[in-house]
Amino acid sequence: MNSKWLLKLTGTALAAMLITGCAANNQDVPPPEEEPPMEEPADPEMEDENNMEEDMEQDENNMEEDMEEEEDQQ
């Protein structure tokens, strides 16, 4: 009987400590920035990403041509 009471009291105390510990958020929230951040200078690697789009379009065209050739051969 005593062990049941002990478990109930321990569980209640643990729950109370968890709730109060999680609710104690003492960190100050920084104010929102009024000025947007400045843009960084252009990166030469970004040019490669633009070329990737062109390469993808070219690959799609090549795939379509290959599919047409396969259909013609059959």
Image (cartoon, rainbow, N blue to C red):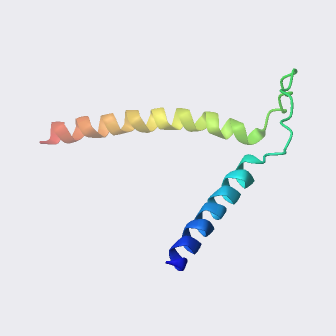
Percent position of residue 69, x then y? 24, 38
Query: Relative to 3, is 45 on the left or the right?
Result: right
Most distant residue in the top direction = 34
Residue found at x 84% / y 33%: 40
Percent position of residue 22, x then y? 71, 51
Query: Relative to 44, is 62 on the left or the right?
Result: left
**Can you say which quadrant of the picture contains the C terminus?**
top left
Residue found at x 67% / y 56%: 16
Question: Is 61 situated above or below 9?
Answer: above
**In front here: 69 or 22?**
22
Percent position of residue 23, x then y? 72, 47
**In front here: 23 or 52?**
23
The quarter holding residue 48 reads top right
**In front here: 33 or 70?**
33
Query: Relative to 9, is 46 on the left or the right?
Result: right
Percent position of residue 20, x then y? 72, 52
The quarter holding residue 59 reads top left
